[in-house]
Image: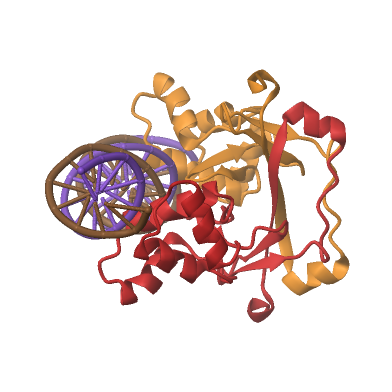
Chain colours: A red, B orange, C brown, D purple
Amino acid sequence: MDNKEKVVEKLRSRGLKITPQRLAIIEALEGNRSHPSAEDVYTELSQRYPTISYATIYKTLETLCELGELMEVNIEPHKKRYDPFTDPHHHFRCVNCGKIEDIPLEEVPMPPVPHEVQEKYGIVGMCVYFFGFCPACKN
Amino acid sequence: MDNKEKVVEKLRSRGLKITPQRLAIIEALEGNRSHPSAEDVYTELSQRYPTISYATIYKTLETLCELGELMEVNIEPHKKRYDPFTDPHHHFRCVNCGKIEDIPLEEVPMPPVPHEVQEKYGIVGMCVYFFGFCPACKN
DNA sequence: CTGAATGCAAAAGCTTTGCAGCCAA
DNA sequence: TTGGCTGCAAAGCTTTTGCATTCAG
């Protein structure tokens, strides 16, 4: 995700409105590396904005995904998580505590996808998920 | 998934019972490469077994996963799919029609995971998901 | 016989939708 | 002023759970 100013500009350029709720959601996400769920965002914001609703959270998260400012991380069945860090990288989930971490490409490269495979499947995206025990849970 | 006889033997060896419902579910899965959801299995079986219930379907699918005879494929948010073909391979989902296909390792190899990364994250599993337009939808 | 499995219904968990009222532009 | 946005409540969809009944071993 770009910084707040750029995201605001992008919203404006699409004719979308800059509401206090959207600003708050953008602020909650900017630089956030915890892979928050919609509930996490709701919980964080409902302290400052007691009347904010899940409907608004979900719709705004979807909008930000459409703008390419946010990525869904579906590493957990039944619960979407969101990642404002949209550069290519992998994800890891601790099967014990549920924590999600990034795995950078320097640690594990992207699997090489031959050009013919790209063509055959019309690939527009891919993701790599790892499962294991995080350092804190390895006891 | 092994053939029906071996799965039955495995169930028996764990002290689990061989019920007609379990047999029917195993039969529906054996050799099935369509990555069916619980609903798919239910729909297929409810014709022959009108009283079979989702509870039974879900519990049996979970049991087969625990026995290592079945794999969850969570390529679709909010809907688990199941794959009786448990050898390592990747999955592809058509963003247009939703069809899920296998991508064998001959087409795309597993990303190389350095030993230190294995250790660091205590890796016990990984999966690679691809998204794009299947041949039939590329119009 | 007996503990495990089934099936029904209800509940749970996450997400989406409808709609009246509100507000950014 | 006005079309898009918000917030509430209700609904939707998949999965899980409680419990009485049934059945495999």
The location of residue B46, given as percent across then percent down, is: 40, 24
Residue shown at the point (84%, 60%) measured from the top left: B113
Residue shown at the point (43%, 25%) measured from the top left: B43
Residue shown at the point (53%, 59%) measured from the top left: A7
Total numbered badges shown on the rendered structure: 0
Front residue of B25 and A130: A130
The location of residue B56, given as percent across then percent down, is: 42, 40
Q: Is residue A79 above or below residue B44?
A: below
**Which quarter of the figure is the C terminus of chain A placed in?**
bottom right
The location of residue A125, given as percent across then percent down, is: 69, 43
**Which quarter of the figure is the N terminus of chain A placed in?**
bottom right
Q: Quadrant of residue A51?
A: bottom left
Q: Is residue A120 above or below residue A94?
A: above
Asked if residue C12 lies left or right of residue A23, the reply is left
The location of residue A92, given as percent across then percent down, is: 67, 63
Residue B119 in view = yes
Residue shown at the point (53%, 50%) measured from the top left: A65
Residue A78 in view = no
Front residue of D2 and A121: D2
